[in-house]
Amino acid sequence: MLDTLSLDLLEKAVKVLDKYSLCDHCLGRLFARVGYGLENYERGQAIKNTIFLLTYYTLQKTTDESLREKLLDIIRKLARTGHEPSLRFLREKLNQDIQVEKCYICEDKYFNNIDNIVQNILETISSAGYEFKTYYVGTSISREVVKRELDLSVEFGIDTAESIKRELNRLIGKKIKERLPPDKVFSRQDADIEIVVNMETGEVKLEVKPLYILTRYRKIFRGVSQVQLRLNVITSLQKVLNEKLATELEAAEAIVHASGREDTDVRMLGDGRPLVIAFVRPRKRPSLETIRELFLNKFDDEPVELVDSVTKTQHATIVKLKQESSRHTKIYRAIVLLDQDVDEEKLRSLEQYFRNRQITQYTPRRIKRKPLKKRVRMVYELRATKIAPRLIELLIKCQGGLYVKELITGDEGRTTPSIADTLGINAEPIELDVLDVLETRS
Ligand SMILES: [Zn+2]
């Protein structure tokens, strides 16, 4: 029977213990991927006990003095790790007192301290007073410990180990879970709060993750910017969101990440523009239902409002929103003043000309800070309606990122073709609205 078992695990363990004193955790962790349903300290204990039993058994059967000395040395090596049966055997049967040594890897610094750390974490969470549903526990430990552990695995060719950080995170995480209410969920990927424990000092830090909300905004009045507050701006979307919502969630601030942006003097109508609001360090994390109510009933007298698609989301959505911005199709309405009257026929041929027309633009003159860059965007469709002599309304369906004002004026030749050039007269937009931002080109 026994010859079917592979005993090199024990052989490796004996070799390791011959050179290094290891606690049950650190010995067991070298063989973490062996066995099932065991914690590392149970593995470590089991290995030490097995070595002790086999050595003791052999010792009883032999009369060879040099072999006896070798076997006793194995028991002394076990004893110096603090293995109680080995210590007692040597003390009571052979009158040998063995000095217990600190664990070579962890120096006995961490595992005895776990209950204190757990208590500390729970107190930190409750005194900080942040609402959360998901949490994650991470630890930081000294680099020397990590290095000693890695070097030891390499030295003995051990490929079944797990890292000490992983073990500590799991043990602390387990105990925290036992003591928190059952509706709190451990989550590595999507944690509302991240608890980071410095295992050297016992210090506990709470990192509160932002609350990300995906929605869309409408801008009903002109003169509102997305983020920046300038002289000619009444307010900004970000300022309104801070005043109306960040205060409700008791967040440090609200940060706006939108999919593109319109000029300050342009309204954003229709179903609005996609937007992620990041609420930084919110003390409150209400249910989605409560958030919806809160968000939709707050904007009565404001020049901006949120539409009723409100969902919780992740940081990754911000990147996606920004990337998608130029793939969106936008519909603009422009009121344009012409310096000459035009007839219906001319407007029809204008519509004809701008059907699926590619527009080449260089950075507009009005954007002073940016370096000159070429941008190519599509106009898909144009509708022109005469409102009064020298006054027309344009409906423009185009690719996201097109400079629409410049499409109308031509920007002194920086945008070609343009409405002004095509009509052969000067054209000036006096009012511009985004009527819709369509998620995909249709
Ligand atoms: Zn140890």
Image (cartoon, helix red, strand yellow):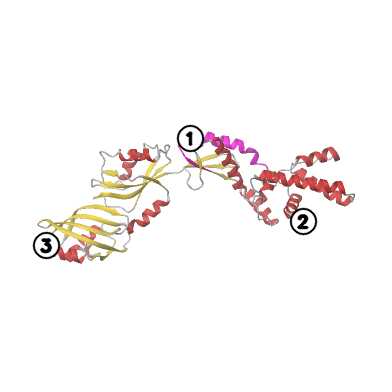
Disc 1/disc 3 C-alpha distance (Å): 68 Å
Which residue, given by chain and number where applicable, does mark 2 sit on? 3
Question: Which amino acid type is shown beneath numbered disc 3?
Answer: Glu
Nearer to me, 385 or 108: 385
Q: Secondary structure at mark 1?
A: helix
Write down the region rendered in magenta: 108-136
Residue placed most toward the observer, 369 or 343: 343
Q: Are marks 3 and 2 in contact (CB under 8 Å)?
A: no
- Label 2 neighbour load within 10 Å: few <14, some 14-19, many 20+: few
* Position in image of residue 283 (x %, y %): 43, 37
Question: What's the residue at 33%, 40% (across, down)?
Answer: 295
For residue 105, side relative to residue 237 (left or right): right
Q: How many numbered marks have been drawn onto this rendered protein structure?
A: 3
Q: Main secondary structure of the magenta part?
A: helix
Report x, y in % for residue 73.
81, 48
Looking at the rendered structure, the secondary structure element under dot 2 is helix
Horizontal and vertical percent for residue 420?
18, 63
Residue 251, image x, y percentages: 40, 39
Point out the frontmost of discs 2 and 1.
2
How far apart marks 2 and 1 lie (CA) works out to: 59 Å
Mark 1 near ligand 1 (CB under 8 Å)?
no
- Disc 1 target residue: 128
Looking at the rendered structure, the secondary structure element under dot 3 is helix
Q: Is residue 407 magenta?
A: no
Q: Is residue 367 visible?
A: no
In the rendered image, the vertical position of residue 396 relative to residue 97, given as above or below: below
What residue did someone put label 3 on? 344
Please identify, in this view, whether the residue under mark 3 or under mark 2 is nearer the observer.
2
Q: Is there CB contact under 8 Å for labels 2 and 1?
A: no
Q: Is residue 343 above or below residue 96?
A: below
